[in-house]
Image (tube, rainbow, N blue to C red):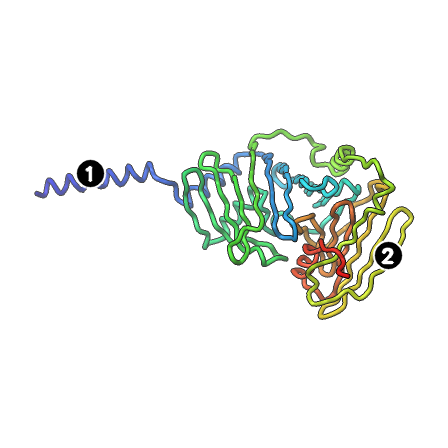
């Protein structure tokens, strides 16, 4: 009897070990594999499609991510709706920039981007979010490992969670869903490819070279003179309790500026400006703030102002009463036409 029990015990232990060897990897195993992936590479190139449902209309972008160790980044955000809204986020040895080739303009940020907040299109940012969240959940499907973690968007608490799908074979992200407080997906990034052994040229991360090439590739309008006449003045649909009190239109030498003042619970001013001619490249405008994604554009957010470009128009939203979250919410809602 004892021999039979001993034999059964040995067989049972062997079966457990066999199943463990053939079974799914643990959360710690997957994180370690992802860490090894990042440690062994000198950089990567990735292509992705990002869809955003944070504004009135859904926005989609084609994304090219270039990363060179240790701290060089180049992220091209090409709007599928309007090429004039294409932008590039660049980080090199001189700083962090957001480039808008259609207007030949750039912002220079005093920021710790990308380390200071979640970035759903950067491998290492996703890995860091997984590692930092001690309450992260983990599960395995037939082809993916799925993490659900908290996000770190300093100026936007409306997107507190994310689901990160990792390919079982390559241990690279294939899908990221950024969720609101009700776990509804508002931002999705689908990765199409990862090259973990890329080659780079020095000029790939040089501001002037990148802007010159991007401007040269921009489509040229056949009717430049009609651009201002076709400017559609847009109004925010979310106003934090304020109402439009005054609207001024100013004719510029080669364009038009519209200044709208809102009064109410919290006052703010919205400026829209569009020019016929493309400016020559100037020195980047310094911003003591952070990069925020508004859905229709990447904006520059400081304590009291939010600046962005969409469809060839410059926008400045200014208020000493709105919070940063409210500035973002008002900006995201700028899509409506005037109510008569």
**Residue at horizontal 69 percent and vertical 59 percent from the top:** 237
Residue that sits furthest to the bottom in the current view: 265
**Residue at horizontal 45 percent and vertical 55 percent from the top:** 135
Dividing the picture into quadrants, the one containing residue 49 is: top right
**Is 237 above or below relative to 114?**
below
The crowding category of the residue bearing disc 1, from other C-alpha atoms within 10 Å (few below 14, some 14 to 19, many at least 20), is few
The crowding category of the residue bearing disc 2, from other C-alpha atoms within 10 Å (few below 14, some 14 to 19, many at least 20), is few
Name the mark on residue 11. Answer: 1
- Nearer to me, 2 or 22: 22
Q: Is residue 43 visible?
A: no
Q: Is residue 98 left or right of residue 28?
A: right
Q: Which residue is mark 2?
A: 249
Screen quadrant of the N terminus: top left
Q: Is residue 49 left or right of residue 219?
A: left
Distance of label 2 from label 1 (alpha carbons): 85 Å
Residue that sits furthest to the front in the current view: 340
Residue that sits furthest to the left in the current view: 1
Q: Is residue 296 visible?
A: yes
Dividing the picture into quadrants, the one containing residue 203 is: top right
Q: Secondary structure at mark 1?
A: helix
Mark 2 or 1, closer to the camera: 2
Q: Are marks 2 and 1 in contact (CB under 8 Å)?
A: no
């Amino acid at each position: 009897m004892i021999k039979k029990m001993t034999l059964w015990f040995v067989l049972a232990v062997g079966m457990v070990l066999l199943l463990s060897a053939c079974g799914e990897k643990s959360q710690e195993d997957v994180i370690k594999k992802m860490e090894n992936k990042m440690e062994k590479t000198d950089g990567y190139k990735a292509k992705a499609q990002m869809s955003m449902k944070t504004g009135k209309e859904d926005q989609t972008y084609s994304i090219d991510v270039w990363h060179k160790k240790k701290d060089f980044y180049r992220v091209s955000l090409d709007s599928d709706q309007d090429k004039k809204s294409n932008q590039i986020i660049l980080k090199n040895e001189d700083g962090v920039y957001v480039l808008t080739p259609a207007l030949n303009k750039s912002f220079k940020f005093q920021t710790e981007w990308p380390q200071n907040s979640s970035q759903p299109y950067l491998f290492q940012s996703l890995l860091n979010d997984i590692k930092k969240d001690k309450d992260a959940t983990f599960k395995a499907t037939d082809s993916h490992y799925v993490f659900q973690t908290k996000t770190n968007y300093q100026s936007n608490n409306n997107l507190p969670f994310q689901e990160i799908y990792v390919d079982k074979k390559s241990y690279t992200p294939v899908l990221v869903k950024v969720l609101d407080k009700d776990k509804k997906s508002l931002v999705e990034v689908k990765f199409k490819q990862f090259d973990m052994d890329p080659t780079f040229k020095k000029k790939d991360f040089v501001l002037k070279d990148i802007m010159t090439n991007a401007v040269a590739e921009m489509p040229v309008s056949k009717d430049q003179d009609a651009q201002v006449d076709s400017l559609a003045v847009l109004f925010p649909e979310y106003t934090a309790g304020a109402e439009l009190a005054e609207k001024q239109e100013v004719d510029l030498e080669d364009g038009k500026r519209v200044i709208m003042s809102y009064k109410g619970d919290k006052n703010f001013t919205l400026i829209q400006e569009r020019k016929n001619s493309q400016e020559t490249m100037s020195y980047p405008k310094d911003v003591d703030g952070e990069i925020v994604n508004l859905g229709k554009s990447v904006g520059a957010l400081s304590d009291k102002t939010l600046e962005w470009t969409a469809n060839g128009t410059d926008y400045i939203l200014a208020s000493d009463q709105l919070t940063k979250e409210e500035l973002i919410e008002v900006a995201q809602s700028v899509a409506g036409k005037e109510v008569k």
